[in-house]
Amino acid sequence: MQFPILSVIVFTPMAAAMLILLIKSERKNEIRVTALAAASLALLLSLWVYFSYDKAVAGYQFVEKYNWMPMLGISLHFGVDGMSAPLVLLTGVVMFTGVLISWGLDDRPREFFAFLFILASGVFGVFASLDLFMLFFFYEIAVFPMYLLISIWGWIKTREYAAMKLTLYLFIGSVVSLIGALVMYWQSGLHTFDMLALEQAAFSPGFQKLWFPFVFFGFAVLGGIFPFHNWSPDGHVAAPTAVSMFHAGVLMKLGAFAALRVGIMLLPEGAKSWSWLIMGLALVNIVYGAFIAMVQTDFKYVIGFSSVSHMGLVMMGFSTLTRVGLTGAGVQMFSHGVMTALFFAAVGMVYDRAHTRDIPRLGGMVKPMPLVAVAFIIGGLVSMGMPGFSGFVAEFPIFMGIWQVRPLVAIIAAISIIVTAAYIMLVIRRVFFGSMPAEFEGHIGPVAVQDKVALVFLCVIMIGLGLFPSLMVPWVQTGVQHLLSLLGGA
Amino acid sequence: MTAFVPSNILAILPEILLLSLGVLVLVLDPFWKEENRRLNLGWLTAGGLLVVLAVSLALARPSAPVLVFGGMLRYDLLGFAFKMLFIFGAAITALFMMDVEQVGRRAEAYLLLLVAALGMSLMASAADLVMLYLAIETTSIPLYILAGFLTGDERSTESGFKYLLFGALTSAVMLYGFSLLYGFSGETSLYALAASFPTFSLLALGTIFLVLVGLSFKVSLFPFHFWAPDVYEGAPTPVAGFLSTASKAAGFAVILRLFTVVFPSLSANWSLILAVLATLTMTVGNLIALAQKNIKRLLAYSSIAHAGYAMIGVVAFSQLGAASTVFYLIAYILTNLAAFGIVTAFGHVAGSDDVKAYYGLSRRAPTLALMMMVAFLSLAGMPPFGGFVAKVFVFAAAIEQGWVWLAVVGVLNSIIGLYYYMTVLKYVYLYRMEGEEEEKHPIPLSRPYAIALTVLTIGIIAVGVIFAPWFGIATGAAMNLF
């Protein structure tokens, strides 16, 4: 038997959380070191999983299966394919940088890291689960700690409202999907929650058409699909920096991934007949999100709405159901995760020093924190889909995919590229350049080493992926191949 | 009629041991000094119950179901599983009672608790109308007294009296239903009754209604739920916890047996009725819980709602349905006992059951706050706690039998539930006490509370994560019905 690496990845953060809770709350440095050690371990393991995934063999690898409850066919079944391997890596990356960014957190760090790690366990679990029941199990574990993380450590003005709204939205979405999943379970007649078996269940087209929207949109709520995106900018803004990073960087992928995994892969016929709706809503996401981002005056809201817009691109990629489109969506999930983590990290650093996120009041930040400015600009270039950065590798195939299916939609969606470029450049100019307001002179402290490490790390990933798309695209392609076979050859 | 067999003693071994323990408590009580009584009585009862639990598990496990004592009782896994739950619940309740003023030092309180547990055990295994009615009354009467145990406290007296009046009324209606059941067949044995129960007539349906009245009262099903908040609020908190868990589970044990064994021919009709009642129970319980300012009333309404969820499994009328109800009750008993235990422990120190009193609890007592989070999240149905799997199983059972709408109602209700449970957690974790001096107002946990709450917290997580063995027990119990 091989080393159960996926279980170790999934349960490392959970174990670390328990360990952290055992440390006395006054010993803050020990807590931070433990957290960093666990996060580094998770990152290394996820790197290992990613790079030792055999693309030639493709399919599900590192598979582990333990019967958890044979009576109902529930098993602890882990495995990654070309779609989920990058997302496992993404979670490792965001977890690691998130811990670095939160180094300076002083209010009850013990509980903070414990809750953050429980959340991380849930996220790893969803990406690695091949069992429908366990997928829900981990999904809910990932949702709830968010409430505490936002409401306790969040931005005081909106945290209560935003946290409650977010949790209720996501919970509603997930239970709606749950009903759909249970219906699928009984309809298949297989008495198993094993998704590999359910993929082959061949549900009748009528059944798929009826239940696809429940399953897909239930999860897509967490992916931020219009008109259920409302929780997301509020949540992003209210959350503390590391949580925003996790939230926009990883959690929204969780929704998109689960919608893909359970919705499209188990109910492919349903996906075909509803793809027009997904495409339409995603189009609204992309264009509307970009325009709203444009008019925000709160730095963090700009990024929040840009996430809505970029996640629309992921959904748009799904809705094409073509090889290029899906590949783009797969890469976009990773690329956006890293990019938005970087954005929120940068926003957090500016806010921590300037104590305001009001764009008109900011300016000239490039002098006291040049590295942050450079990192933000790199993130901005990724966001615009500039060649040479990961955003291009992701967005270009998505647009190609749409063009193949519906050229008109591609043209409308392309507006968003211009708008995105506009708001990103506007923010860069207003926040980082221009003259610094007098009130900040001499008040802007230097950026800590951990923060710099985190920013550089994220930038390297985005540039590396932009220059060498072969570091990710082949992985995603093997996943897409499997998806297409489920969709009926294509 | 089966002849008496000595080995039948095993069938009532838990009951015999419970009674012996009760006598022991009474006999030893006068020999103890006043100041030692509280500790001695509590530990004796709780420890004794644990011994009863262990001995019963070791010796009295049933194999194939048989009718014993002239068909009065049925010796099967359904009854046995519930008995173990009641004994466990009583042991935890005994620990909670120790530190409650006016209750902890009185031997009668422990005796009444034991007698109530005895009655519940008989309810779970009763196979004859006469036995069933006697068992229900044996359970109810000690509980009436316990609810009104704080004689100096008006609200407790009101609580006891209200519980008595409601209980007596519904019990009388149920007795009338029993007499009609007897009239149909000339039989009192549940298992013989089923054969001659008519397939469909208004009278038969009416009889079901009458019987249901009494049982609805026990499990606080709509529209017989009105007593619960007032009684829970006034009763000593551990007693309220016991009422909302063990007593409710006993009601469900009877409902499961009656509806599957006696009325299967009418299942299509009563399933729909129960489905509507479950819907109303969940919805009313959850909606009113939203507005509660007192934590005991909030938990009372939440426990009404939970009766609705557990009912979904009964509505499904299948082996999986019955199993999921039993599993739901296992998870629910652990969770709700923990919730009431925390309220008891908190109220003991803080002297208030107001939800606002919980401001800043996470700073005053981090461990207690963490336990409270575990209990409340389990009630809300979040993994990795027992409540999540339990809810998924009842919904799965409902959907298997085509009750998709009922599952949807259940799911929507759990969202409302999540809202008010989270609101309480918000006070605990987010808000500060007046003056922000939480460090000066710690909530010390005495040993009985610490032990009981630790056991319950571990139990909630164990049921929620390693659910297969528990579900195995539940399925074994349900198999005896079909």
Image (tube, coloured by chain):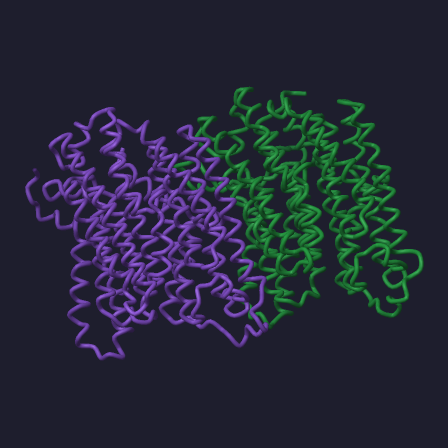
Using the rendered image of the protein, determine whether residue A54 is visible from the camera's viewpoint.
no
* Above or below A134: residue A299: below
Instruction: Find the residue positioned furthest to the right.
Output: A435
Q: Residue at x 18, y 28 (%)?
A: B195
Chain B shade: purple
Foreground: B384 or B139?
Answer: B139
Residue at the (77%, 51%) spot, across then down:
A343
Residue at point 44% right, 34% down?
A: B406
Q: Nearer the viewer, residue A44 or B161?
A: B161
Q: Tell me residue A14's x, y (percent).
A: 55, 55
Percent x, y of residue B288: 46, 49
Query: Split into 4 quadrants, where in the image is the N terminus of chain B?
Result: top left
Q: Is residue A154 left or right of residue A376?
A: left
Residue located at (44% from left, 64% from top): B353
* Picture quarter with the C terminus of chain B: top left
Drawn side of residue A274 relative to residue A76, left or right:
right
Q: Nearer the viewer, residue A20 or A177?
A: A177
Query: From what the image shows, is residue A296 above or below residue B152?
Result: above
Please tell me in which quadrant of the rendered image residue A356 appears.
bottom right
Residue B68 appears in the rendering = yes
Depth check, front residue: A430 or B50? A430
**Figure chain in green:** A
